[in-house]
Amino acid sequence: MKIEILVKELPLKHTFTIAHQSRDVQTTIIVRLLDGDEYGLGESTTNPFYGMTVENMTAALEAAKPLLADESIMHPEILWEKTKAVFAGNPFAQCALDIAAWDLFAKKQRKKLYDFWGFDPKDIPLTNFTIGIATVEKMVAKMKEFDWPLYKIKLGTDHDMEIIRELRKHTDATFRIDANCAWTAEQAIRYSEELKTLGVEFMEQPLGKDDLEGMKEVLKHSVLPVMADESCIVESDVKKCHGLFHGINVKLVKAGGITPGLRMIREAKSLGMKTMVGCMTESSVGISAIAHLAAILDYVDMDGAMLLAKDIATGVEITTDGVIFPDRPGTGAKMLEG
């Protein structure tokens, strides 16, 4: 097998701001894994907050090339184990290769990925559409521009409740809120009461990832469910989050791909926790992979490509009536020309 690496820039429709960063363009890495005449596509974005750069992601993928040069396609779980040493400390690069491996493996079986797993696409929950931090006027404008029945609202300002109160005046949509570690336990508990009356479904990562004692109090006293994000990065975090959160949000790029992501989802389910997969600001390559997983989830956040001014690929189409999969095997993702 051969690995080809493409670096692409994804322009956003609007400046995207969360509690610790803003961006107008997202750099992403596309991996093409080739075996004979067939190939699979995978993707992972760079991320300065997690120290993931074009340089170190590319270096990790280059280091994997010799391990696969004399190999034919193998089960993605075997490939993940075979290459995991070279990706130590760089799960983002590992994710791009792992998604490409699953795409290629399903293509070799002449099956859509969800069919290979035996998942029913009719069970896919509706994705939220994310509204990043901005002035209230700009946040309202974004909702009017993209009318959607379910929004994730990014918070982490000194006037978070005012934002939600004002947004509620302009839509009947369900809200989810993501504070990105910005609150204290006292704030999360107190805010949860009003947020519930304002039509919020759950709170994502209200406290810092290491504030375990605070999360015990939030879990005990919050009137809204709480989902882990930054507190649940890798497989060993799932068990740690049990008893602190009602559920987990798995980010494939942070976990190292679909292979560990599936294990995390299954473990969380076995513990009676809710499951969600979230995205970065990815193209349709990464989002299409998430869509195939979505049928086994309680919630999904796969709006990354919907936030782009220009996509670099085609793949799944996300509508309020469900996900439309292209009539192609694998994930269905296909690069656009140019």
Image (cartoon, rainbow, N blue to C red):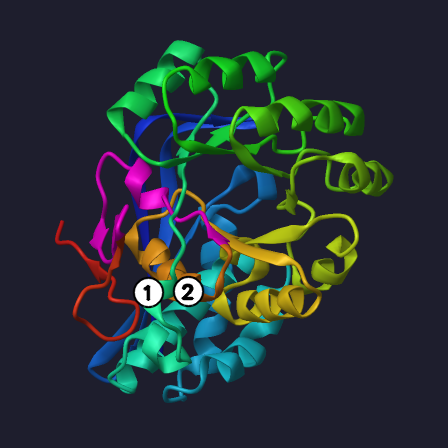
Query: The residue under label 2 is which amino acid type?
Result: Ala
Q: Residue at x 59, y 43 (%)?
A: 50
In x, y percent, where is residue 215?
Answer: 79, 40
Left or right: 48 with respect to 304?
right
Secondary structure at badge 1 equals: helix
In x, y percent, where is residue 146?
Answer: 27, 30
In magenta, the rendered stretch is 299-321
Give the residue number, with chain letter if any, for mark 2: 295
Q: Nearer the viewer, residue 76 or 278?
A: 278
Left or right: 196 with respect to 9?
right
> Outermost residue toward the left?
337
Secondary structure at badge 2 equals: helix
Say above or below: 176 vs 294.
above
Circles 2 and 1, Cβ within 8 Å, touching? The answer is yes
Q: Quadrant of residue 139?
A: top left
Q: CA distance from mark 2 to mark 1?
A: 7 Å
Query: The residue under label 1 is which amino acid type?
Result: Lys
In x, y percent, where is residue 27?
Answer: 38, 42
> Outermost residue toward the right?
213
Say above or below: 42 vs 172.
below
Say above or below: 104 vs 127.
below
Q: Residue at x 62, y 53 (%)?
A: 248
Left or right: 203 with respect to 143?
right
